[in-house]
Image (spheres, grey):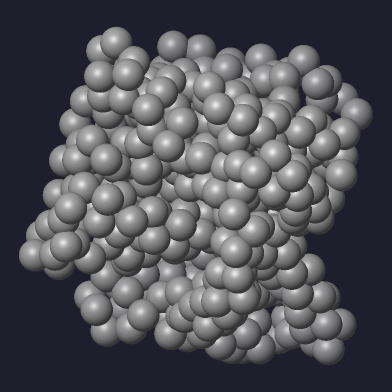
């Protein structure tokens, strides 16, 4: 092992250690990258001229039309949440399904899927679902563990169901990585890959995961009915209930279908569809008389804060990746994975385990910008479909959000759960849903067509 490879390993270890100590991600990536670049220059294993590429990289980030969709999708999701549209949807579906055993849990799962398609922000969705649905489920007599597990699992669907912020960022990173890996293999006519392909590829696996959740809740209602009793609420029924369901469900569902459908149909780019979604969410809030100056100010502030965090990490990650590659880290990683016994399967399994474990301590944005550019080229060099690989990454990250003891979704729910709900209830309640996600991940690994069929039908 040469000096450059040794410094690349120390670079990774230093970044992970500083992040665990709580240092800001963007400044850690950039600062440690510059520090190790200086060490590399001193040991004559790093060419300082590589940093001349930074201005063009930054310019490329700021002019990337795909990344324009990030603040627009965030604005759309936060507006739907702050304007109480999500709350109306949850209450209405609870009245619709609540008379059935397990019906309230199923309605929470379905609302989580709709919110996932409209927000794409895991923390915001879990907190909103916890505040809105957990008290109702507890009053209805639901088992604490089942209620907490259902809310955490449904709240993390924003990782896999498009249009998702995670998929936008992951698709943008994979698009560049895929092009570079194919050129390295000598393939000049590279088949295009974009965020739109990843949206189409994640659609069916996301629905499969929702179906697994619903099947599990139905089974619990059948075999252990005491854990999920019906919610007897006859205050609204008949045509009045039908009108209420239509009023609460159709507008946000139409907005989500219009945004995602326009992207998949090729009528709009992700940025154009996201702008339509942001304006549509604002109009819905205005029509429901939930839009005020204070709400608008809060939505803009949250959107600005999240967007600045994303782009700050992205710019810092550019320095980190440039230094890592300049030290020969990318070659070292590729040689390691290609030399593993078992070939592609062993490499994929090891990478999935690493991503899963890192999901305990790092946010998905950090993993997308730090880990994926390092490990993805090794798999893409083995002629892997980038759509399937991207969906595997997304579902894996979603699983790590739930797994005790460090799952981020568990911390989000713990922060808003009442005192009667113990932390142990949250941890034990999520375990069946983690197993369901691992089953879905195994199904996707065994049947890649779940991710590749729809893009091939739409775009080929």
Q: Residue at x 36, y 60 (%)?
A: 175
Q: Tally the numbered discs.
A: 0
x, y percent for residue 129: 67, 48
Image quarter for residue 134?
top right
**Which residue lies most toward the right here?**
419
Q: Residue at x 64, y 59 (%)?
A: 48
> Taking the image as drawn, is residue 102 in sight?
no
Foreground pick, 123 / 181 = 181
Relative to 392, 316 lies left or right: right
> Taking the image as drawn, is residue 415 in sight?
yes
Foreground pick, 245 / 9 = 9
Foreground pick, 306 / 209 = 306
Q: Quadrant of the C terminus?
A: bottom left
x, y percent for residue 281: 57, 80
Q: Residue at x 27, y 50 (%)?
A: 184
x, y percent for residue 164: 49, 59
Image quarter for residue 448?
top left
Image quarter for residue 385?
top left
Q: Residue at x 25, y 19 (%)?
A: 343
Relative to 348, 14 lies left or right: right
């Amino acid at each position: 092992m040469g000096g450059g490879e040794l410094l690349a390993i120390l670079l990774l270890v230093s970044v992970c250690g500083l992040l665990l100590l709580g240092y800001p991600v963007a400044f850690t990536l950039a600062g440690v990258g510059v520090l190790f670049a200086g060490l590399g220059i001193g040991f004559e294993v790093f060419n300082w001229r590589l940093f001349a590429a930074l201005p063009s990289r930054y310019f490329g980030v700021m002019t990337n039309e795909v990344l324009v969709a990030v603040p627009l999708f965030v604005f759309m999701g936060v507006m739907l949440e702050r304007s109480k549209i999500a709350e109306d949807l949850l209450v209405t579906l609870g009245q619709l399904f609540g008379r059935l055993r397990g019906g309230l849990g199923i309605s929470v799962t379905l609302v989580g899927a709709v919110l996932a398609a409209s927000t794409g922000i895991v923390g915001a969705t879990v907190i909103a679902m916890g505040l809105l649905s957990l008290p109702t489920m507890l009053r209805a007599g639901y088992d604490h563990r089942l209620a907490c597990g259902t809310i955490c699992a449904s709240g993390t669907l924003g990782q896999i169901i498009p249009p998702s912020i995670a998929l936008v960022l992951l698709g943008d990173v994979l698009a560049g990585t895929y092009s570079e890996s194919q050129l390295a293999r000598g393939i000049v006519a590279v088949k295009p890959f974009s965020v739109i392909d990843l949206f189409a590829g994640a659609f069916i696996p996301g629905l499969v995961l929702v179906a697994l959740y619903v099947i599990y809740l139905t089974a619990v209602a059948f075999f252990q009915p005491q854990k999920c009793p019906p919610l007897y609420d006859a205050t609204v029924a008949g045509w009045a209930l039908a009108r209420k369901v239509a009023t609460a469900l159709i507008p946000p569902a139409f907005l989500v279908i219009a945004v995602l459908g326009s992207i998949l149909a090729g009528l709009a780019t992700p940025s154009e569809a996201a702008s339509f979604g942001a304006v549509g969410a604002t109009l819905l809030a205005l029509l429901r008389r939930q839009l005020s100056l204070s709400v608008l100010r809060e939505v803009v502030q949250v959107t600005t804060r999240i967007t600045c965090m994303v782009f700050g990490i992205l710019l810092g990650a550019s320095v980190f990746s440039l230094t890592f590659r300049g030290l020969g880290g990318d070659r070292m990683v590729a040689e390691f994975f290609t030399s593993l016994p078992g070939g592609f399967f062993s490499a994929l399994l090891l990478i999935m385990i690493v991503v899963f474990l890192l999901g305990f301590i790092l946010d998905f944005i950090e993993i997308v910008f730090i880990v994926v550019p390092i490990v993805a080229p090794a798999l893409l060099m083995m002629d892997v479909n980038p759509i399937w690989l991207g969906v595997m990454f997304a579902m894996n990250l979603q699983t790590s959000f739930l797994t005790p003891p460090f799952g981020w979704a568990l911390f989000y729910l713990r922060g808003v759960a009442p005192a009667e709900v113990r932390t142990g209830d949250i941890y034990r309640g999520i375990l069946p849903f983690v197993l369901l996600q691992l089953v879905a991940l195994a199904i996707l690994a065994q049947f890649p067509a779940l991710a590749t069929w729809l893009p091939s039908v739409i775009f080929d």
